[in-house]
Image (spheres, rainbow, N blue to C red):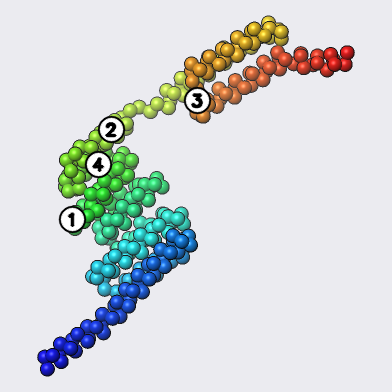
Amino acid sequence: DRSNTIFINVKSRSAVLSPLSSAFTQMFNMLDAAAEQMMVHKDFQAAFDSCDRGLQSLASMDSEDNRCGELKAGFCILGIQALAELNQWQGVLSWVLQQYEHPEKIPAKIMQMCILLYSKVGESAVMQEAARVWLHSPSNSRVSGFGTVAELYLLHVLVPLGHTEEARELIVGEVGSGAFTEDQRQTALDVVVEKEQQNQEPPLSPVCSCSTGAVIRKLEAMLSFLYRKLRVAGSGSFSLQRIFLAAVLLYMLFVQMDPALPSSFMWISKLLQMLKQMWSSMFAPYSRSLPQSKGL
């Protein structure tokens, strides 16, 4: 009887495990298909739709099984990439939160992807609250990617946003002690101090614009003076023309004004205008006399 009971139990377990194994096999196949749509066919919308369907199917399965967690993370990673390729990155965090409900439950590698994605598109602030909650959750302090999330949060969220006080608290506090070594904490503090110094430095643009304006005014005065001299000297004075050309070249060499800078556009435009006027003044008589000479 006892052996019959054991046989019945084993048989019933097999009957229960067999559908589960079949379901997991189906989920893995769906994940492979989504990866193929993403990497091979470049059909990002189809890849995302496959991930979404896979996540819906996983929601009805035993969430305590480790394989469910791995499959869920795989679908989410592919889904994030698909949304980024579709230029729908704005909805990435909300979509991930639909799958995990709370920020602290998001796997470390997915949190890292989200921080990097929003940092790349210049929207680091979107991840601030979710990453803060994730890092201060005691259950996450023991996961393998905890230090990487803390580093990315510090370098790609807090420091770019100028939240140096919170960054300092993160480094010297409980999160920093669990995420960084002593040398890493010191390096991170140096980064924060450098950012604070940059924030305290006065903006340079007004000073630059004023100095550039003064240079342009002086150059206009110099060019106007040379232009008047050339008109008085007459069109045949080639030595004075060479002097003017040499003065312009020396100015550009010593001042080293970058033509690619927006502040130099006005200078270049005015210089070209004056050169055209001077060219016309100096050489127009020759161009008018040439046809007459040929006629003679």
Residue drawn at point x = 39 percent, y = 47 percent: 120
Residue drawn at point x = 46 percent, y = 24 percent: 209
Between the C-alphas of marks 4 and 3, the distance is: 38 Å
**Residue that numbered label 3 is attached to:** 258
Indicate the position of residue 160 as horizontal and vertical percent values. 33, 40
* Precedes in sequence: disc 3 or disc 2: 2
Q: Which label sits in the foreground, 1 or 4?
A: 1
**Residue that numbered label 4 is attached to:** 167
Q: Which label sits in the foreground, 1 or 2?
A: 1
Which residue is farthest left? Answer: 2
**Residue that numbered label 2 is attached to:** 194
**Residue that numbered label 1 is attached to:** 142
Q: Would residue 275 appear left or right of 266 to someone viewing this image?
A: right
Q: Give residue 190's quadrant in the image.
A: top left
Q: Amino acid at mark 2?
A: Glu
Q: Amino acid at mark 1?
A: Arg
* Precedes in sequence: disc 4 or disc 3: 4
Indicate the position of residue 7 as horizontal and vertical percent values. 18, 88
Between the C-alphas of marks 2 and 4, the distance is: 12 Å
Which residue is farthest right? Answer: 296
Looking at the picture, does residue 200 appear above or below residue 146? above
Q: Which label sits in the foreground, 3 or 2?
A: 3
For mark 1, does the 10 Å Cα neighbourhood hold few (<14), some (14 to 19), or many (20 or more) residues?
few
Residue drawn at point x = 19 percent, y = 54 percent: 141
Residue 56 seen in render? no
* Precedes in sequence: disc 1 or disc 2: 1
Camera-side residue: 65 or 92?
A: 65
Indicate the position of residue 135 as horizontal and vertical percent values. 23, 52
Q: Would residue 237 appear left or right of 292 to someone viewing this image?
A: left
Residues at marks 4 and 3 touching, judged by CB atoms closer than 8 Å: no
